[in-house]
């Protein structure tokens, strides 16, 4: 493609390349020279024809327990590859510490043992290069399991030096921005993210085992709904239509219940145009699931099975530590109403939690806007008291029930007391992890509550939603009695891996734009 550029195009392209390479350090220039020497000796510094046949973890399983004498030197030669993390050079021989992602292993390179070509390539090696070897396994005099490199090659020449081995990336923001380097240097960080993968796999298999159908629903919505949140706005050029990135998949999943799928779930990405914190990332993962002919009580039992199963089968523990708190993962979990929780954790009586002045008194020392509190209904004051005074104290897994209808626009009203809905939120470590309810399937009631939301939006509430008339129409065809729930995967992974920030369990968390060149704004 470059051959077809005009002279001015070549100049422009050269500018983009030069402005980057001018930032290279002296160390990088030395590595580039070694790359040129590899090329001059007829060796491609980015080979693609040498494939490992064995993982280091497999070699450890086979031979780690054998003594030096029992092992000797294996007759079988193994093909292995990985990234060099340490080099101990002795002139005509060297030991390399190599990581292949499954484990760390030692390579032994020696002038009279390794091929002439292989030893010549070793002499151009740098810490961080990805290398290949073929040879037998043995143990050194110190008992270190090693591969004797009969064949050796540099597969990928590393141009940029890795951080110093024992300290890795010290800057926390760099750890998240340059996650690829963090994972090379920090085995604990890599294992934490591997555990996240095991957690999500277990959750999927859990729902497959209960005959749920995994589905995929749209991520761009003409009406943002399913939660109270500020959406990201975008524009579709071909349709000339304003869209929102989804804040929740709920309304589409319930359409599928209407359509005849009795059990559905989606491991989904959601987007909310809100602030960042140790518990919040604007792009996050949840699982939402819906079950026809079930109630929110059924989902409490299901949640207990899921969380205790994660402890038993993935974390391999019945209790875990998060910071200084020990959290039991063993079912059954505590259950209480919101009013009971406020009573317990604020030393209030049953009469006081229905007294407006008492609730206002509980909220005096909070950062909530006094004008907002003065306008709030009794039910909203109860919710504020719960959020400000109780949530952080729910360390052990706890289900909180009986949420006011006023703040639950998609939940089914309780038959005995319509001021409340058949809903629970699930808490661990003082954080909301899950939200569930028996679904509202009365289209008239749903339209009325959508209208309330639309009025709130018109009055300036940027977390309120518009009326989703198509969803109302779907309910008018009839949705069977259904219960549904969403669980925050990121926060759950934080707790199960003892991670103090959500960034530790997200591969590439959102960060401010990085400016590489001084003239950038």
Image (spheres, helix red, strand yellow):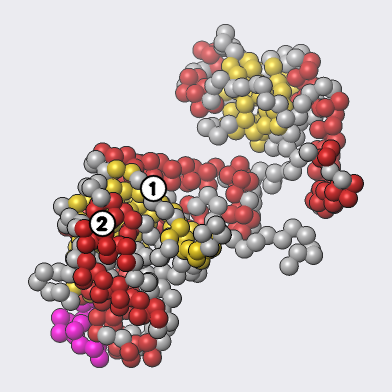
Residue lying furthest top: 75
Q: Is residue 373 above or below residue 203?
A: below
Question: In this rendering, does residue 468 appear at all?
Answer: yes
Task: Give the quadrant of the N terminus.
Answer: top right
Q: Is residue 85 above or below residue 506?
A: above
Indicate the position of residue 199 as horizontal and vertical percent values.
Answer: 38, 44
Residue placed under numbered mark 2 in the picture: 484
Q: Provide the residue span drawn in magenta.
A: 341-359
Instruction: Tell me which label, 2 or 1, sits earlier in the chain.
Output: 1
Residue lying furthest front: 239
Residue placed under numbered mark 1 in the picture: 216
Indicate the position of residue 19 as horizontal and vertical percent values.
Answer: 83, 53
Give me the residue at 30% from left, 62% from top.
Answer: 471
Q: Could you tell me what secondary structure mostly forms the magenta stretch? A: helix
Residue lying furthest left: 416
Q: Secondary structure at mark 1?
A: loop
Task: Give the quadrant of the C terminus.
Answer: bottom right
The circle drawn on residue 318 is none
Q: Is residue 505 above or below residue 354?
A: above
């Amino acid at each position: 493609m470059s051959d077809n550029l005009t002279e001015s195009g070549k100049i422009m392209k050269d500018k983009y390349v030069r402005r980057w390479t001018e930032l290279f350090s002296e160390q990088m220039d030395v590595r580039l020279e070694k790359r040129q020497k590899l090329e001059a000796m007829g060796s491609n510094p980015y080979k693609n024809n040498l494939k490992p046949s064995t993982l280091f973890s497999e070699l450890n399983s086979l031979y780690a327990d054998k003594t030096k004498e029992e092992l000797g030197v294996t007759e079988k030669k193994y093909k292995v590859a990985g990234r060099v993390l340490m080099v101990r050079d002795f002139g005509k021989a060297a030991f390399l510490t190599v990581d292949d992602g499954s484990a760390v292993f030692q390579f032994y390179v020696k002038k009279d043992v390794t091929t002439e070509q292989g030893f010549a390539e070793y002499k151009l090696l740098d810490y961080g290069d990805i290398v290949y070897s073929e040879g037998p396994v043995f143990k050194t005099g110190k008992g270190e399991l090693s591969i004797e490199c009969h064949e050796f090659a540099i597969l990928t020449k590393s141009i940029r030096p890795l951080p110093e081995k024992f300290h890795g990336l010290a800057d926390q923001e760099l750890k998240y921005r340059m996650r690829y380097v963090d994972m090379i240097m920090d085995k604990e960080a890599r294992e934490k993210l591997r555990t996240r993968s095991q957690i999500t796999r277990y959750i999927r298999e859990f729902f497959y085992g209960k005959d749920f159908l995994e589905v995929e629903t749209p991520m761009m919505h003409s009406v943002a709904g399913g939660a109270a949140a500020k959406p990201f706005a975008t524009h579709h050029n071909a349709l000339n239509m304003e869209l929102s990135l989804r804040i929740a998949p709920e309304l589409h999943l319930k359409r599928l219940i209407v359509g005849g799928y009795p059990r559905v779930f989606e491991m989904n990405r959601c987007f909310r145009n809100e602030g960042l914190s140790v518990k919040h990332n604007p792009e996050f993962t949840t699982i939402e699931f819906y079950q026809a002919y079930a109630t929110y009580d059924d989902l409490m039992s299901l949640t207990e099975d899921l969380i205790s199963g994660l402890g038993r089968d993935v974390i391999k523990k019945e209790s875990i530590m998060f910071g200084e708190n020990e959290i039991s993962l063993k079912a059954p979990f505590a259950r209480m109403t919101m009013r009971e929780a406020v009573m317990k954790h604020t030393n209030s009586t049953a009469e006081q939690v229905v007294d407006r002045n008492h609730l206002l008194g509980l909220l005096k020392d909070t950062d909530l806007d006094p004008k907002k509190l003065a306008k709030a209904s009794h039910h909203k004051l109860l919710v504020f008291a719960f959020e400000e005074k109780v949530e952080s104290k729910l360390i052990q897994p706890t289900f909180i029930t009986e949420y006011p209808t006023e703040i639950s626009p998609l939940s089914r009203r309780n038959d005995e007391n319509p001021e409340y809905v058949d809903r629970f939120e699930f808490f661990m470590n003082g954080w909301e992890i899950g939200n569930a309810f028996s679904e509202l399937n009365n289209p008239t009631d749903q339209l009325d509550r959508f209208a309330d939301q639309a009025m709130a939006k018109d009055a300036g509430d940027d977390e309120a939603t518009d009326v989703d008339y198509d969803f109302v129409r779907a309910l008018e065809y009839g949705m069977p009695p259904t219960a549904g729930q969403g669980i925050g995967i990121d926060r759950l992974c934080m707790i199960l891996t003892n991670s103090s920030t959500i960034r530790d369990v997200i591969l590439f968390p959102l960060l401010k734009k990085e400016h590489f060149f001084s003239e950038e704004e």
